[in-house]
């Protein structure tokens, strides 16, 4: 909780928060509010103004990188990896296919760079698809040649997201977006990224789930009583006093984004159900996990009905009967959420 700044003492400004927790995950779902905003509000509370995030991105204090928002200075820890893409050592079959596909479409890649150099920032729709070999995938990226090529060009350090036009990303040359600072050598950068991730999580398995932008292999070994496996812990967080509070969390919050870690440490049963048919949902389309003190205690099923100016509460699912103190604290958070969204509280329509 301390690592994720979810204890009683709240942060006072957005940039310091993101530097501490290392990233805000971007997701287009906004049944209540965009996830990045929900994460910031859950820490900063009423002092968080959504315009602060827009300003920080516009002034390049924060930058968008591979579906996350990060402190601009952290990009120096990724540039050496970009230069070495797709990586040294043995590659998997799919890793070998990616650079081969980029090379097969080198003329389109160069055309994108020329257009951005003279006319950027541009959306992907404004970049013509001149790929000679289409991208093949069993998923939603199939034949999305320009967006897939742009993704690989991000990984190569050639282009970057320079802003947004509505929900569309604006692309530009990376040299115009990323800070002009010395590149950190690859081995040192990997170690520092690992340290920063562990400091943001507080405790994690020695090898967590694969995450391309965040490897994990740092910290002191630890044992979690009653839980199997080897863990790593940030020793700077040990032995500090802790005072908790109530919080409503985004489904994409880093406290629970690793679902196995969530179950092991908190014994919390949760799944994001927006992709399930309504009849099969237990907790709701975009239910917010509820934190109280040092436990995850329930889920809030709510929807922001902006047309009606209402935050509609469909249900509040407690994992166990709440005490009066717990119920009152969570109720205050629900009212604070409605006030922050500038909506009236209302029952489901």
Image (spheres, helix red, strand yellow):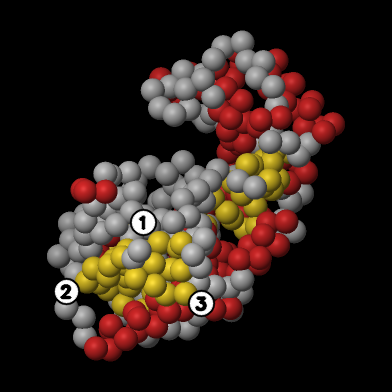
Measure how far apart labels 3 and 2 are at the Cα level. Answer: 27 Å
Question: 324 and 254: which one is in front?
Answer: 324
Residue 41, relative to residue 213: is it above or below?
below
Q: Residue at x 68, y 18 (%)?
A: 108
Examine the rendering and report whether any part of residue 5 can be seen: no
Provide the residue designation for mark 3: 339
* Mark toward the start of the polypeptide (3 vs 2): 2
Q: Position of residue 339 (x, y in %)?
A: 51, 77
Q: Earlier in the sequence, mark 2 or mark 1?
A: 1
Calculate the distance from the C-alpha at mark 2 to the C-alpha at mark 1: 20 Å
Q: Nearer the viewer, residue 182 or 336?
A: 336
- Please tell me which residue is depicted at 55% across the width and 43% down the height of the picture: 66
Say few, some or many: other residues with alpha carbon within 10 Å of mark 3 (under 14 / 14 to 19 / 20 or more). Answer: some
Quarter containing the C terminus? bottom left
Report the disc number at residue 271.
none
Numbered label attached to residue 286 = 1
The residue carrying pointer 2 sits among few (fewer than 14), some (14 to 19) or many (20 or more) residues within 10 Å by Cα, namely few
Q: Considering the numbered disc 1 on the image, is that residue within a helix, a strand or a loop?
A: loop
User: Which residue matches tag 2?
Assistant: 320
Horizontal and vertical percent position of residue 24 = 52, 57
The quadrant of the rendering that contains the N terminus is bottom left
Query: Badge 1: few (under 14), some or many (20 or more) residues near its Cα, within 10 Å?
Result: many
């Amino acid at each position: 909780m301390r690592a994720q700044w979810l204890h009683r003492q709240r942060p006072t400004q957005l940039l310091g928060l993101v530097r501490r927790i290392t990233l805000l995950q971007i997701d287009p779902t906004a049944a209540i509010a965009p996830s990045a905003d929900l994460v910031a509000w859950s820490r900063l509370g009423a002092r968080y103004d959504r315009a602060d995030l827009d300003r920080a991105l516009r002034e390049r204090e924060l930058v968008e990188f591979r579906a996350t928002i990060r402190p601009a200075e952290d990009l120096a820890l990724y540039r050496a990896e970009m230069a070495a893409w797709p990586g040294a050592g043995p590659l998997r079959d799919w890793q070998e296919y990616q650079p081969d596909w980029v090379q097969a479409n080198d003329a389109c890649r160069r055309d994108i760079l020329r257009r951005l150099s003279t006319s950027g920032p541009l959306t992907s729709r404004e970049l013509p698809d001149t790929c000679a070999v289409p991208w093949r995938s069993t998923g939603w990226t199939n034949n999305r040649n320009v967006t897939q090529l742009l993704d690989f060009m991000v990984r190569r350090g050639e282009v970057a997201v320079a802003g947004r036009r509505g929900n569309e990303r604006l692309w530009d040359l990376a040299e115009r977006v990323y800070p002009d600072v010395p590149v950190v050598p690859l081995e040192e950068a990997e170690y520092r990224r690992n340290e920063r991730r562990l400091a943001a999580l507080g405790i994690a398995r020695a090898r967590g789930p694969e995450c391309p932008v965040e490897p994990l292999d740092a910290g002191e070994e630890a044992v979690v009583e009653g839980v199997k496996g080897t863990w790593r812990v940030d020793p700077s967080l040990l032995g500090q006093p802790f005072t908790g509070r109530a919080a409503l969390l985004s489904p994409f919050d880093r406290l629970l984004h690793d679902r196995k870690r969530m179950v092991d440490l908190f014994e919390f049963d949760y799944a994001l159900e927006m992709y399930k048919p309504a009849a099969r949902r237990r907790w709701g389309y975009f239910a917010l996990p509820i934190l109280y003190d040092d436990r995850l205690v329930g889920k809030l099923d709510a929807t922001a009905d902006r047309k009606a100016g209402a935050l509609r509460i469909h249900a509040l699912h407690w994992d166990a009967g709440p005490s009066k103190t717990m119920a009152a604290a969570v109720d205050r958070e629900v009212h604070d959420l409605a006030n922050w969204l500038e909506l009236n509280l209302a029952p489901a329509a």
